[in-house]
Image (spheres, rainbow, N blue to C red):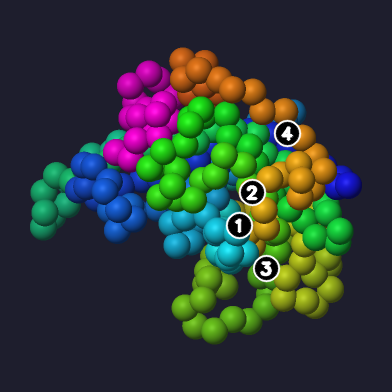
Amino acid sequence: MSRIIEQGDIFFFYRPRLGVDAVDELTDVQRFFFILRPDGSSRFRRIIVGRKRLPDPAAHERTWAFVAEVAEQPEELHKELVSTTYETRTRGIRVQPEARPAGEGRYAIADHSGHTHLAYVLELPSKPGPAQEAFRIRPEASYVVAVRNPLDESPPGVGLRPPQRAQYPPELQERFGGRRFAPLDDPRFLDYEGAEFVLIGAAEDVEAELGITLDAERAALENADLFRQLRLKPGELPTEPLEDGRLV
């Protein structure tokens, strides 16, 4: 059995590259990220996933990710979600397309056999489609999570530069014990911008893998927590990926 350390809501997004109106493949995507909102907290963590897709649980693939933003108010996240227009000296007016919501569900961080897992179950869309397949958003999945020591040296070009990395308080930094990685046994690691970690695909059946059941409930698009919790207005973001799994 596993011990649940934290649970809450998870929201998946992808954002097209500058000047791309419709996404047909990953090269059209600027970034893929998800937002965690723990139960009983007003905190939102925006986490960017490397390779612009989740690791394959069946292949136990590994993917690097980092905490890009920690916000206490959802409006602070809007600059990364809604469309923006700005003017450049050489190219004139440029439009950054709005992000596309690609999934909504429930997540848990759980201690399991000496490792820590991040697991989720989707609530929307009810049936995954091409959008979820493109980013490997499974109906449910579990990943082993290992947090990177920000004081550890790394080869040039690997991960964030030292000034961009998290600065943990002593009680968290001590958990590394001089090691390069530590399990995510304290969710406070994710409350610091620049926190880096590795996601390792583990399983596509959360209950069978971890022995826990997430309190996910199938929802209709009009009742999506994503828009209510992130305080987004109807029409601000395309909803096709969240409604029927279409890639737009």
Using the numbered discs, state the Cα–Cα distance from disc 4 to disc 3 in whole angstroms.
27 Å
Q: Relative to residue 122, is residue 171 depicted above or below?
A: below
Specify whether 229 is left or right of 79: right
Residue indicated by mark 2: 204
Q: Secondary structure at mark 4?
A: loop
Crowding at dot 3, Cα within 10 Å, few <14 / some 14-19 / many 20+, comes out as: many
- Magenta span covers which residues? 228-248
Please provide percent x and percent y for residue 151.
68, 75
Q: Residue at x 69, y 63 (%)?
A: 147
Which residue is situated farthest in the bottom direction here? Answer: 155
- Three-letter code, disc 4: Leu
Mark number, residue 133: none
Crowding at dot 1, Cα within 10 Å, few <14 / some 14-19 / many 20+, comes out as: many
Q: Are marks 4 and 2 in contact (CB under 8 Å)?
A: no
Q: Are marks 2 and 3 in contact (CB under 8 Å)?
A: no
Q: Residue at x 48, y 61 (%)?
A: 50
Disc 4 or 2, which lies upstream in sequence?
2
Residue indicated by mark 1: 57
Please provide percent x and percent y for residue 20.
22, 47
Specify whether 181 is left or right of 175: left
Residue indicated by mark 3: 148
Q: In front of the other: label 4 or label 3?
A: 4
- Three-letter code, disc 1: Pro
Residue indicated by mark 4: 214
Please provide percent x and percent y for residue 102.
44, 38
- Three-letter code, disc 3: Arg
Using the numbered discs, state the Cα–Cα distance from disc 1 to disc 4 in whole angstroms.
18 Å
Q: Residue at x 78, y 76 (%)?
A: 179
Q: Secondary structure at mark 2?
A: loop
User: 61 or 100: nearer the eye?
Assistant: 61
